[in-house]
Image (cartoon, grey):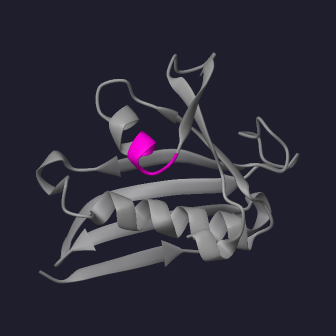
Amino acid sequence: MERKEIYLYTKETQKYKEWLYLCYKDADLIGFSLAQLDTPENPMCKRIGWGFIREFFIIPSCRRNGFAKQMCNFSEKIIVGNGTNNIYLTADANFGIPFWEAMGYSFTGKIDDKNGNKIFEKHIANEHDL
């Protein structure tokens, strides 16, 4: 099984500090992650200076094969590499919570007012922890 990743970098990602990661298995697109560094310029900003894993998806037939962990690691590395050690996300109650807990994220006790999902956070002490 060949794995390859594509990281898209455009003027929009540069302006808003957003990173789209496409995950392929052989020639098939099987997932994606959209991460950002919250800045005042970004209309999706909720916490200035924090990293935000905004979207995250792996097709069901490819779950539990390491692809999601690979995408999470990429998102965390690029966020930390752009100046923050704090990351948050909202987790889908049906599929996401066990995965994000296994990746070291903790429930904040808060619910997102837009999507109704639980908000999780992670503090990464330094890049060597990734």
Comparing 127 with 16, the one in front is 127
* Residue 1 on the magenta segment: no
Residue 121: name its quadrant.
Answer: top right
Residue 112 visible: no
> Residue placed at 25% from the left, 65% from the top?
29
Q: Which residues are magenta?
A: 100-104
Residue, far right: 40
Q: Is residue 23 above or below residue 6?
A: above
Residue 11 percent coordinates (x, y): 71, 70
Residue 63 percent coordinates (x, y): 20, 52
> Residue placed at 66% from the left, 73% from the top?
127
Magenta segment's dominant SS is helix
The quadrant of the image that shows the C terminus is bottom right
Residue 27 percent coordinates (x, y): 18, 77
Q: Is residue 49 above or below residue 18?
A: above
Residue 44: name its quadrant.
Answer: top right
> Residue placed at 40% from the left, 29% from the top?
92
Residue 9 percent coordinates (x, y): 60, 74
Q: How many marks?
A: 0
Residue 100 visible: yes
The quadrant of the image that shows the N terminus is bottom left
* Residue 102 on the magenta segment: yes
Q: Is residue 70 above or below residue 58?
A: below
> Residue placed at 54% from the left, 63% from the top?
75
Comparing 46 with 124, the one in front is 124
